Image (spheres, rainbow, N blue to C red):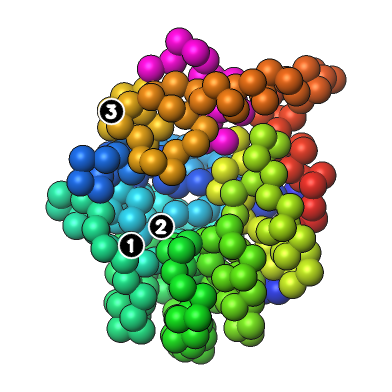
Amino acid sequence: MLRRLGRSGIEVSALGFGCWAIGGPTWRGETPVGWGEVDDNESIRAIQRAMDLGINFFDTADAYGAGHSERILGQALAGRREPAVIATKFGNGYNESTRQLGGSFASPDYIRQACEASLRRLITDHIDLYQFHLGGFPAEEAGPVVQTLEELVQAGKIRAYGWSTDDPARARVFAQGPHCTAVQLQENVLDDNPEMVALCNELDLAGVNRGPLAMGLLTGKYTGSTSLGGDDVRGTRAPDWMKYFKNGKPNPEFSAKLDAIRAILTSGGRTLAQGALAWLWARSPM
């Protein structure tokens, strides 16, 4: 199943492959912002298997694993770049050797340097969708960011761009740019985002959904007896913004919501994840 990536006309698989977890352990001070240890070879096999099954959209960020996620994705897509649609992000500072994140950056020079670094790690000459990763950046200061992204389009470094934000006002500012084609938003059956969905429909923007399965809660894999590790962003030292998990376990608030609709999502022989994804695809063509 293919969908149009907003105004760009690029065709992408309705189901994408999120590459945050494959970055491995990452930290902001003492707080984990990665998903713990992963096997790089397993990550590469998973990406290649996804391609074999018809998935062509891969979403990563330079901050995922402090560059490591982009490197793994680039290795996995070696020799298969043309059918793939690569989305990555910029704006968060990081130290590749320590896996520490720190600082937020949005100057034109920084954006150009970040783009070149991502191109090298991804082993490609262009990025299909380049996304601003600072969701809370002031909308009134976003003009130079859009201008720089337009210059990168003209230079052939990127094909289109978007903003990872759940604020309609910020998305509207970016959407004024001719090559803005997407907004990355949080949306799932437990956590609807009607304003952003409506905005995507109104402005012909693709809604790149960063939380379709509520960070794993909608897989059914995690229960009250779950205990996620201290190096997992969902674990016992989770950042304050983490809402689907608390203290390394599913958040009781969202677990109760899931229990209330579990029978509906799994009706007709569907798995929980299949039901959750079906709801999203029926929610909007964007």
**Picture layout, residue 189 above or below residue 6:** above
Q: Which residue ends up furthest to the top in the rendered image?
A: 225
- Residues packed near mark 2 inside 10 Å, few (<14), some (14 to 19) or many (20 plus): many
Please name the residue shown 37% across and 67% down the image: 91
Q: Amino acid at mark 1?
A: Asn
Assign a secondary structure to mark 1: strand
Seen from the viewer's position, the closer of residues 147 and 179 is 147
Q: Earlier in the sequence, mark 3 or mark 1?
A: 1
Q: Which residues are magenta?
A: 214-227
Please name the residue shown 74% across and 43% down the image: 280
- In space, the residues marked 2 and 1 are separated at their CA atoms by 9 Å
Q: Earlier in the sequence, mark 2 or mark 3?
A: 2
Name the mark on residue 230.
3
Q: Amino acid at mark 3?
A: Gly
- Residues packed near mark 3 inside 10 Å, few (<14), some (14 to 19) or many (20 plus): some
Viewed as shown, does residue 164 lie left or right of 109?
A: right
Q: Earlier in the sequence, mark 2 or mark 1?
A: 2
Assign a secondary structure to mark 3: loop
- Residues packed near mark 1 inside 10 Å, few (<14), some (14 to 19) or many (20 plus): many
Q: Quadrant of residue 85?
A: bottom right
Quadrant for the C terminus, please. Answer: bottom right
Label 3 close to label 1 by CB (< 8 Å) = no
Please name the residue shown 27% across and 40% down the image: 31
Label 2 close to label 1 by CB (< 8 Å) = yes
